[in-house]
Amino acid sequence: MNAPVAHRALLGAALTAALFAAGINVAQSQSEPTPAYPAAEKHKPTTLADRIVLTHEANPSNSQSVTWRTDTTVKTAQAQIAKSAGGPGFKSSATTVLSTRDVQQTSSLGAATVFHTVRFTGLEPKTQYLYRLGDGTNWSEWYEFETAAATAEPFSFVYYGDAQNDIQEHWSRLVRKSFSDAPEAKLYVHAGDLVDTSNNDGQWGEWFKAAGWINGMKPSIAVPGNHEYSGTTLAPYWRTQFAFPDNGPTTGGTQAVLDALKGTVFYTDYQGVRFIALNSNVSAVASALRPEFLKIQRDWLEGVLQNNPNKWTVATFHHPMFSTAEGRNNPDQRASWLPIFEKYGVDLVLQGHDHSYGRGNMAQGTTTQTGTSIYVVSVSGPKMYEANDSNWTTNGAIAKKIGMNTQLFQVISIDGEKLVYKSKDATGKLYDDFTIDKPANGPKVITENLESTKPANVGGAVPNTLSLSLGTPGTLGTFVPGIGKSYEATTEVTVTSTAAEATLSVVDPSTNNPGKLVNGTFALAQPIEAAVNGAFAPVAGTPVALHAWAGPVSNDKLNLKFKQTIGANEALRTGSYSKPLTLTLSTTTP
């Protein structure tokens, strides 16, 4: 089935200025909304441990690292650890471990901050431990983790694409759904762009708050995305708050490149799986050093794969081998790394960046494939791009599944010779599903467990005569407090289309009270409504169809009406209410 191909007229500025920015004169006696809580106060450190995150610096079966944040009044950062028990008596056997690293920084919000790291060593494999963090007087609650088994055993892990935007508002529900869906998952893999602005302490605060205590109980593996960089500078928080293995490249290139890779390229072995983290951010170094940036990692990667005792291998980095978003391409990275992945049969390559979903393999495979690597692009946050498979097909790959406009998490389960991959949306609904069977004495077989789907790539077939324009805008006028009334405005829309059918729709693409006019953070109670030759329909965060054509049209003029209803008892805030909207003329049969 052909997917809609849209030709958009972005009318936000015009609509905002002409329709919704009319003077809305509200009496000054109206009470003002509560001011926003200051970010510097919301995210400031204290004596108590926060931003707690587990990582692995060494062997996961006998060690565990934990990093946390305090203010500078803490002089002796420490942890207590004990084997878990069914009652409170475990506390008497707890041992104290002093922090092994304390790094002081000034946050972007002006707070003097210290990140502390403790590495618990000498632990027993496959054992549950309790730990807490503090200064000897002020303690966190007790957190629990389990060490890995010393040998290959069944386990599952969770993989996320970009969180990036509106993290506390939108990403938090996805993380919690993934935890409730897979509470026994042992690891969490983040494929970059955890935040939108690398040095924004408020965004990092949202990331830690969204994940909450999960970060303190389930170890993380994370790679930086382009939004963890400002130019060539890595987020100052990265190396201080994530204690990853120090086993990345140390030779084979310029020291500046090796330094840039430190703390971002590593591997760790967990119960029969080798997890490999790479850094795809070539802009982290000067342009002259970018080929070396890729080559150093390629050579290191080949060594890590040549000497891999594990049955399964998972690689993760940010920029995709095969992009799912229009106009994106990473040819240098693909030329350098792809042959290595295919040569050694890396089982899963987990990526982000394109704010959409794609999953596939090189074209030698079919529905049941042998001897091939699987490449996945996913997104976990609310920022979305349109997706297609053109970058896959033009580079010798097949996209088995392409999707968009869906927040996703992935649960990957490994048991002996079988890997089961399930992608789910924020409600827990199954989105993608396949299995890899890897017998000891036979070829690898990948089996689709759902019908693979992807939108038809028909964008290029839409003629340039699919067009949309606005006439002279109208105005909603002035809202009068205390009087129940509907205010209307009309503007003329002119449509030309040579398609067999077309649809005009309207959508509010914002995340601030979609469908409602806003004055800062204050929103009207009722949504703005729109109509074309029919009944009014509320504008929303998803497209609302206003009119359809069953054949080609030329200069078809329609009256586009907007209506805003104000209740007699509705509280109004002084100022102008506005919202940029998007009108879309689309067709599925050009």
Image (tube, grey):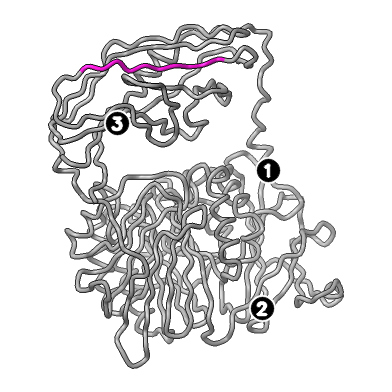
Where is residue 225? Give x, y as percent: 42, 54
Quarter of the rendering occupied by the C terminus: top left
- Camera-nearest residue between 216 and 335: 216
Q: Which residue is mark 2?
A: 121
- Camera-nearest residue between 22 and 118: 22
Disc 3, SS:
strand
Mark 3 or mark 1, whichever is nearer to me: 3
| Range shown magenta | 557-566
- Camera-nearest residue between 373 and 74: 373
| Disc number placed over residue 44 in the picture, else none | 1
Disc 2, SS:
loop
Query: Residue at position x 22%, y 33% from top?
Result: 502
The kind of residue tagged 2 is Thr
Query: Residue at position x 37%, y 52% from top?
Result: 353
Disc 1, SS:
loop
Q: Which residue is mark 3?
A: 584
Asked whether the beta carbons under mark 3 and mark 1 sit within 8 Å of each other, the answer is no
Q: Is 565 inside the magenta-drawn segment? A: yes
Task: Give the vertical position of 320 relative to 45 (above or below).
Answer: below
310 horizontally vs 143: left or right: left
Q: Earlier in the sequence, mark 3 or mark 2?
A: 2
